[in-house]
Structures are given as structure tokens and as C-alpha cells.
Image (tube, helix red, strand yellow):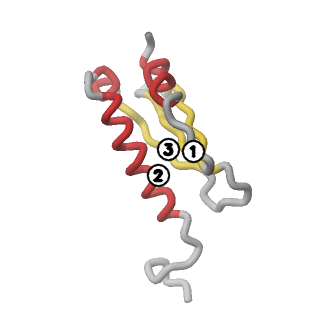
Amino acid sequence: MTLLETVQTELAKYEHPFFEFSARDTGKGVELCIRSKIPGVLSPEYRLTFAERDLRSTQFPWTLQRLLYDCLTDYIVELFTKSPMTGSR
């Protein structure tokens, strides 16, 4: 199984009503893309690249889950159109 197939196999275990997940080989690792299913979102996708050493680890399924959940949290926070942190009033 290739490294890309490893990520795709793990991603197939996840489904979300607001986000879709995909992976592609970048030559430097495998890039995970989290994309909003909601039209008109200002930042329609969030990307993260896994290094080969991460993908070959026996702990990869748990690492992917942890990073997927962390990335979703970060992505949702980045989607705020107004907050005290953005300086918008």
C-alpha cells in the first residue's frame, strides 16, 4: 500500500455533514485537505502535510484522528467573520 493509499484508507473512516476530506501526494509527503461543503465560505479549505515518517508510524491512525480533530477546530475558528481578535467592530 502506498503512503497516499494509507491516508485515503484512514480518511474513508470519517464522514462529516459540513466538511469533506481528501488526500494527495505532494512529493514531500501526503497532503490532507479539509474542504467546506458550505458554499461561499471565505476560506474554503484547510491543508496539512504529513511527512513520510508520520505515515509509516504504527500510531498513524491515532495521529491522523488527533490532527484531524485539531485541524477542524482550527479551521472552524478561522472561519469567524467577526470576533474581538480580528479587530472588526
The answer to whether residue 14 is left or right of residue 68 is: right
Q: Residue at x 59, y 73 (%)?
A: 81
Residue marked by disc 2: 72
Q: CA distance from mark 3 to mark 1?
A: 17 Å
Callout 2 crowding tier (Cα within 10 Å): few <14, some 14–19, many ≥20: some
Looking at marks 3 and 2 on the same chain, the residue that comes earlier in the sequence is marked by 3
Residue 75, position as x, y percentages in the image: 49, 56
What's the residue type where badge 2 is placed? Leu
Residue 31, position as x, y percentages in the image: 48, 34
Residue 14, position as x, y percentages in the image: 51, 36
Name the secondary structure under disc 3: strand
The residue lying toward the viewer, choosing from 51 and 77, is: 77
Q: CA distance from mark 2 to mark 1?
A: 11 Å
Looking at marks 3 and 1 on the same chain, the residue that comes earlier in the sequence is marked by 1
Residue 15, position as x, y percentages in the image: 56, 38
Residue marked by disc 3: 47
What's the residue type where badge 1 is placed? His
Q: Residue at x 56, y 89 (%)?
A: 89
Callout 3 crowding tier (Cα within 10 Å): few <14, some 14–19, many ≥20: some
How many numbered circles does the render carry?
3
